[in-house]
Amino acid sequence: MTRTQVLEVIGSDRDEQALVDAIDFDRLPRHVAVIMDGNGRWAKSRFLPRLEGHRAGVESVRSTVETAARLGLEALTVYAFSTENWKRPTDEVSGLMGLLKLYIRRELKTLQTNNIRFGVVGGLDGLPKDVQDELRRGIAETAHLTGLQFSLALNYSGRSELTDVVRRIALEARAGTLDPTTIDEATIEKRLFTAHLPEPDLLIRTSGELRVSNFLLWQIAYAEIWVTDVLWPDFRRRHLLQAIADFQKRERRYGGITAAGSRA
Ligand code: FPP
């Protein structure tokens, strides 16, 4: 997408236009990952049940997916439900599951129209059957699409993902199908839920917390982290644009040295 096309979509908001102008379209992050936090606090500040915060958060997901697709990002992965989230009250968990189903039902057409390939990062099998069915339908019906790869991280935690990978590698070694002396980083990467995605360049976290919260632990090794105080239900296009503009001001050294020769 060209700058003009992005501007057409962005409309007449001057601040957003200025942000689009500040973005170098040749140096976009390939993969943006998001820890969506603050739904509960957003609801509490309005004297609403927590689920209303999650419901409002779905609108932010919609806006973020649309912006990411229009900018031409390759991948967007958002943390929607962690393996630890099962500990929440039953009605909150079932409410979140209901929102997931509804999201796919309502958004599938829009995802398809925008050439967006939908995916799940995490233990899909551990979700309720009806939610699985809906998600699998979303995955199957967008599998051929070639634009933004949009993934929901569901029933996901970085440690359990890595533990599973270690177990599978050990089993393969025991079965004689893998020579342990050949194990390298690629051996692990190939077995991650994200094997088909570039690694995240930018990790966004909302609601001001300075934590990684067990999200994509292996994959974010060199990601730039951008934290905003904005609560997830208030997160909109301009915040994503700001995060990308700020990302482009950072110098990524991957443990090396800068062009000027100073230490990384
Ligand atoms: C964190 O806020 C948010 C979650 C655990 C769930 C995120 C889910 C959504 C945005 C809605 C579902 C998404 C889709 C696409 C259907 P929190 O509840 O931990 O907030 P708090 O820290 O303020 O309590």
Image (cartoon, rainbow, N blue to C red):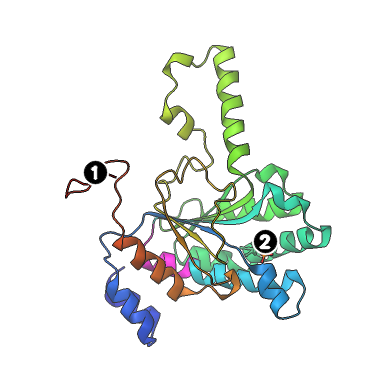
**Residue that protrudes farthest toward the front in the picture:** 262
Q: Nearer the viewer, residue 132 or 142?
A: 132
Relative image position of residue 61 (x, y in whole percent): 56, 67
Q: Is residue 251 visible?
A: yes
Relative image position of residue 94 (x, y in whole percent): 78, 59
Q: Quadrant of residue 46?
A: bottom right
Q: Main secondary structure of the magenta part?
A: helix
Q: Secondary structure at mark 2?
A: helix
68 is within the stretch colored magenta: yes
Q: Amino acid under label 2?
A: Leu
Residue 57 is tagged as none
| Residue behind mark 1 | 257
Q: Is label 2 or label 1 in front?
A: 1
Quadrant of ligand 1: it is bottom right
On the picture, is 202 further left or further right than 3? right
Image quadrant in which the C terminus is located: top left
On the picture, is 262 further left or further right than 162? left
| Residue behind mark 2 | 100
Relative image position of residue 47 (x, y in whole percent): 76, 80
On the picture, is 177 further left or further right than 85? left
Q: Residues within 10 Å of mark 2 (few under 14, many from 20)?
A: many
Label 2 near ligand 1 (CB < 8 Å): yes
4 is within the stretch colored magenta: no
Q: Nearer the viewer, residue 224 or 140?
A: 224
Q: Is residue 54 visible?
A: no
Which portion, as a residue range, is magenta? 65-73
> How many dots with numbers?
2
Relative image position of residue 110 (x, y in whole percent): 52, 69
Q: Nearer the viewer, residue 191 or 82?
A: 82
**Residue that protrudes farthest toward the left in the picture:** 260
